[in-house]
Amino acid sequence: MESPGRRECPFPSWRFPGLLLAAMVLLLSSFSDACEEPPTFEAMELIGKPKPYYEIGERVDYKCKKGYFYIPPLATHTICDRNHTWLPVSDDACYRETCPYIRDPLNGQAIPANGTYEFGYQMHFICNEGYYLIGEEILYCELKGSVAVWSGKPPICEKVLCTPPPKIKNGKHTFSEVEVFEYLDAVTYSCDPAPGPDPFSLIGESTIYCGDNSVWSRAAPECKGPRPTYKPPVSNYPGYPKPEEGILDSLDVWVIAVIVIAIVVGVAVICVVPYRYLQRRKKKGKADGGAEYATYQTKSTTPAEQRG
């Protein structure tokens, strides 16, 4: 007899996996008659929230995304077909918003990138030769809300003008009376007559012209005179290059005085030493002569004379 507190499960344990498998089969069979989520596009989006599956014959509608607008008659909807796929549809019916048309600037050109005015693209501006751009070289087509607008104002092209070229020393240029020069206007420099026999020399390009960005094509040339002549350098050595010029020309007064004193002392020494030497010789000669004379007198006296 079974315990009264224990109750048997109405479904045997081996039957539960079978029931789960059957439920999955039923679910898959229901999905097999449906379509998956509809396709997505760059220019249009699904109206409403997408579902995990759609029944056969069910229709979904699209709308153009922000920055795009619809042009009929292309369809913007699709239907779940019997083969569980969606009928063909594309976003070709949605066109990008375009920025307002921009005319070419006077003496220039406006060039749309990729040949379109659609938002996300650019407009490039260039000027004709002899003109320069004032403003932004590139404008961007951007969205403000749902409207496409340019990022700034179109630039303008101004004529290239140059101020008068610089004046040069000892020279001049043509059209010196003109105050404003246009693009490619040229001037030619020349040198004035020199005061001496040798003329001035023009160093650099003689002709320059008004170029891009209102800048002259080159720096102005220079007029330089003949090479100046200088006196030959004075040597510090006596006898070169002029014999009358000696070492004393470059010495200080005190140094010269010391040299003069030294020379005088040297001359005095040279004169005194031989003089003293001769005086000593003279005195010595006299002394030696007296002694010899006394000896001679002694030798010449007879013995009788010596006794007497």
Image: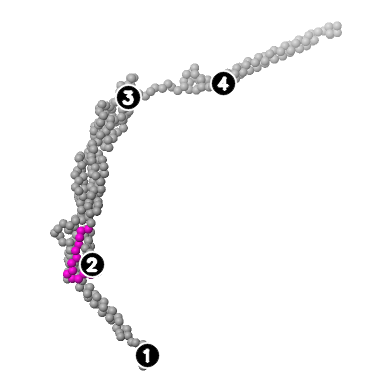
Please indicate, yes or no, whether residue 279 appears anywhere in the rendered image.
Answer: yes
Tell me the mark number nearer the camera, choosing from 3 and 4: 3
Compute the Cα span from label 4 to label 1: 147 Å
Among the two numbered marks 3 and 4 on one chain, the one whose residue lies closer to the N terminus: 3
Residue at which label 1 appears: 3
Which residues are drawn in magenta? 53-65
Question: Does residue 51 appear to the left or right of 243 in the view shown?
Answer: left
Secondary-structure class at tag 2: loop
Question: Does residue 227 appear to the left or right of 86 in the view shown?
Answer: right
* Residue 282 horizontal/vertical position (percent): 69, 12
Secondary-structure class at tag 3: loop
Secondary-structure class at tag 1: loop
Nearer to me, 284 or 163: 163
Q: Amino acid at mark 2?
A: Glu
Looking at the image, which residue is at 26% across and 40% down? 134
Report crowding for label 1: few under 14, some 14 to 19, many 20 or more residues within 10 A (C-alpha): few
Residue at which label 4 appears: 254
Q: Hey, which quadrant is residue 31 in on the image?
A: bottom left
Determine contact: label 2, label 3, CB under 8 Å: no
Q: Amino acid at mark 3?
A: Asn
Secondary-structure class at tag 4: helix
Compute the Cα span from label 1 to label 2: 56 Å
Residue at which label 3 appears: 170
Tell me the mark number nearer the camera, choosing from 4 and 1: 1
Among the two numbered marks 1 and 3 on one chain, the one whose residue lies closer to the N terminus: 1
Tell me the mark number nearer the camera, choosing from 2 and 3: 2
Q: Amino acid at mark 4?
A: Trp
Compute the Cα span from label 2 to label 3: 89 Å
Among the two numbered marks 4 and 1 on one chain, the one whose residue lies closer to the N terminus: 1
Q: Amino acid at mark 1?
A: Ser
